[in-house]
Amino acid sequence: MSDKLKQVISRQNKQQQNESIDQSDDIVQLVGFIIGEEEYAVPILSIQEIIKPFTWTRVPQVPKYVMGVFNLRGAVIPLIDLRLKFGLSEKKHSDETRFIVMKDRDDVAGFVIDRLTMAIRIKKENIGPAPDTINGDNTTIDGVGKQEDRIITILKVNKLLERDF
Amino acid sequence: MDEFQEILQDFLVEAFELVEKLDEDLVELEASPEDLELLNGIFRVAHTIKGASSFLNFDVLTHLTHHMEDVLNKARHGELIITPDVMDVVLESIDLMKTLLNIIRDTSSDAGVDVSECVARLDKISGGDGDVSSPVVTAPVVEVAEPVVEDEPDYDNMSDDDVEAEIQRLLEQRQAEDKAKREAKVAAGEEVLAPPPEPDEETSAQNAKESKPEKKLEPKSEPIKAPVPRASTNARPVSDNEDLDNDAKAAAPAKRSNNSVDQTIRVDVKRLDHLMNLIGELVLAKNRLIKINDDVEERYEGEEFLEELNQVVSIVSLVTTDLQIAVMKTRMLPIGKVFNKFPRMIRDLTRELNKKIELVIKGEETELDKSIVEEIGDPLVHIIRNSCDHGIETPEVRLANGKSETGTISLTAYNEGNQIVIQIDDDGKGLDADILKNKALEKGIISEKEADNMGEKEAFLLIMKPGFSTAASVTNVSGRGVGMDVVKTNIEKVNGIIDIDSETGVGSSVKLKIPLTLAIIQALLVGVQEEAYAIPLSSVLETVRISKDEIYTVESRSVMRLRDDVLSLVHIGDIFEVERILDSSEHAYVVVLGLGAQKLGLIVDSLVGQEEIVIKSLGEYLKGIKGIAGATIRGDGGVTLIVDVVALMEIAKNVKATSMISDQNSESAQSREKTKASDYTIMIVDDSKTDRMIMRKSLEATGMSLVEASDGLEALNILKQGDYHFDAMLIDIEMPRMDGYTLATEIKKYNRYKQMPLIAVTSRTGKSDRMRGVESGMVEYITKPYSADYLSSVVQRNVNFKSEFLS
């Protein structure tokens, strides 16, 4: 028992050391998720929470991708479907569908995503700028993260939370 | 004393806040000196502090702010450019203000700080020669510093030189005292062994004694004994006086923070909102707990622990309810809190202006949301000052005009609909629209053309413009043309309306109409299809149940007869783009909305009931949606949108006749063009896997797409999700959870599935079963067992299967 405990503790210590090493580097922590076929990510600190889908209330006179509002422990928060926002077709929510609640200062909104992937630690040097063709102030793309075998599009949370209708 | 203390505390809390803000704003102003808005804001703050301090008799503070205000005023009118040098002086004066405020907090008077130098510099900046001010500065200091010798006539009788000398002497004395005080403070705070008292110490000790009665003996022993017991025992017999003084100083700040300034705590409304939300959550949890308790009670009837559980649940629910009420109450304040400071203000003003004015207060128990109460304090001060200064005439003039010598200002608050009205009436000389217009023309606030087109009421509102003032000279009371600007800004901040009425020679009346947007409102909840909306009950006149043939169409608008009137109608679904999924019944409800003289009938599917709701904003992202005033969270945790009746009436004007009946078949008629066999989709509903398999096998040959469901509920959910477009359904009758008949009845409620063929596949062969099948909307009735070919042919017939698809 005590051996096991020691093991656990030593492992935790190692992890912490690893973490501290990571932190000393220029590491960006992201949360990855899938919309359609693509993997996207947002900085972990801009995420307030991730919840399973529940009921929401439709709001009239808004673009289709604004699904409505929902009650997050007493706060009325807009719900935005990123599939529709990114021009993909509508898809029914599955077991893997999640609402990611993101915040940028006082702005908060929930975003519907198809599925979460993982928390990602990525070195700053591995993040490239958004492709020239979509660069500019109006893009929601912050940069492109490269990891071994895949490419992750990093999104600008403040742009996502900006009203654009 | 008590009343004064209360006002003083409010003043201090407010003043500290304002000064804090001044600091920020001034620094920002230095960065952008052209920002007139900012400058105006700063000026208003300075003006407010000046106003408040002058009526509390803090002459030094008033004096200082007055000169600061002068500088700002010049800058505001472009006569002065804010250079860093100017800013230095202004900031220095702010620091002085802070010092003064601290002293006021500690001693309830503003004596003891020499502001003359700073004032002189301020004066120089604003164009004076710098000397004029000093006697004015110090005179009040004297007055306040020595409350014992407060008899003003003494000074009045002195010659100017004598006054100078006296002032000089008192000043020196005061400065020495202050020095001693400061030293004593430091000593008391850091070590017990104080430096030997200076000769002046005694006076200040006496002062301290005067301002704080006997109480101080109590805490005295503690601070002394604790750190260095020896020192206290030794010191006491030698110089009790010194000890007492030190103690008083050490104990005083702590004592004050206990029972004076901190008696009221200003809380950020956000925090209260947060608290409110948490309690909402608690209420939801409580409701669930009660429900669970009921379930448990049912299941374990007679068990002993139930009694205990019951008790706990009822205590929790009781406390939750109380808590909810308590928090709601923290947000509501009687307006009396604001009104109470006015009698004193009026009294001081009457003395200052040599007028006789009586203040009548009514409705001080009217409750308002806390944030609104805070916003209306300033505006009311300015309006009342204005009434006193410009409205009420001097006694002589009043008598000459045949009025009673004493003027009356009445301050009334009452509820009107979902608004609170605060009315300030005076029986003074009233406003003259023509004079106002001329003045505004003169000052270039309006153009000649505007003046010509201006009605009387609009002209009255000119007094709210920044920089407008009818008073010939700038007095301490009013006339800078800033006060009423404050009124407008603050009232607009809470979405209020200002209404001014006046009759020359008879008096004027200012009405502030403030909506209760932040408060909890009563709402009528209505249902349309599967959605619910909340309509503020204050704009609902009545509700009527009508049958559809009572709706007529006139010039492509729906109308109905309501008693002797014709009421134009609009369907709530047309306004809020509600998809018609469910078939609406024969009857509908009309909610008659009234807004002033305007009336509108809103057709809804059902009336849910009346509920008390808390308005929440939809937030930055969704603000400004037409027809939606906000949202509220319901008992079940869902969000319900609140209808904005004003906007709704606007929208309704552009909505053509309600398409209530017209679009019945549109969707199902649009059955898509079939290009291949798999475009046909059939749902198989059966609880037996074998049966489903048999059906699947029978139909597979046709190449149709097949979807399976194991009972009625599952089938219904698949339909609701709308992932597929079904051409027909095969339904077993006997199934768990929801049987075939019920399923069929449910399906037929949906418009888009009205035309879909439902085929019963069952082993029930009785005639009554078949009858029930037909009643619930089944078109075919296949009895088990059946041949695969038969089933396939029935389905093909019902979906108009094109034979060329058969391979």
Image (cartoon, helix red, strand yellow):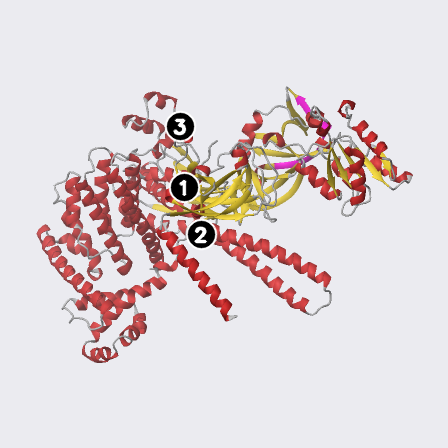
Q: Chain of mark 1?
A: B
Task: Report which residue position mark 1 lands on.
Answer: B424
Q: Are marks 2 and 1 on the same chain?
A: yes
- Above or below, B301 against A119 in this view is below
The 10 Å Cα crowd at callout 3, few under 14, some 14 to 19, many 20 or more, is some
* Percent x, y of residue B714: 72, 43
- The kind of residue tagged 3 is Glu
Label 1 environment density (alpha carbons within 10 Å; few <14, some 14–19, many ≥20):
many
Place residue B478 in its image quadrant: top left
Is mark 2 in CB contact (under 8 Å) with mark 3? no
Give the mark nearer the N terminus: 2 vs 3.
2
Q: Is residue B185 left or right of residue B635?
A: left
Does residue B543 show up magenta in the picture?
yes
Chain part drawn in magenta: B541-553
The residue pinned by badge 3 equals B456
The answer to whether mark 3 and mark 1 are in CB contact below 8 A is no
Work out whether residue B740 or residue B449 is closer to the camera in this orientation and state it: B740
Residue B781 percent coordinates (x, y): 85, 35
Q: Main secondary structure of the magenta part?
A: strand
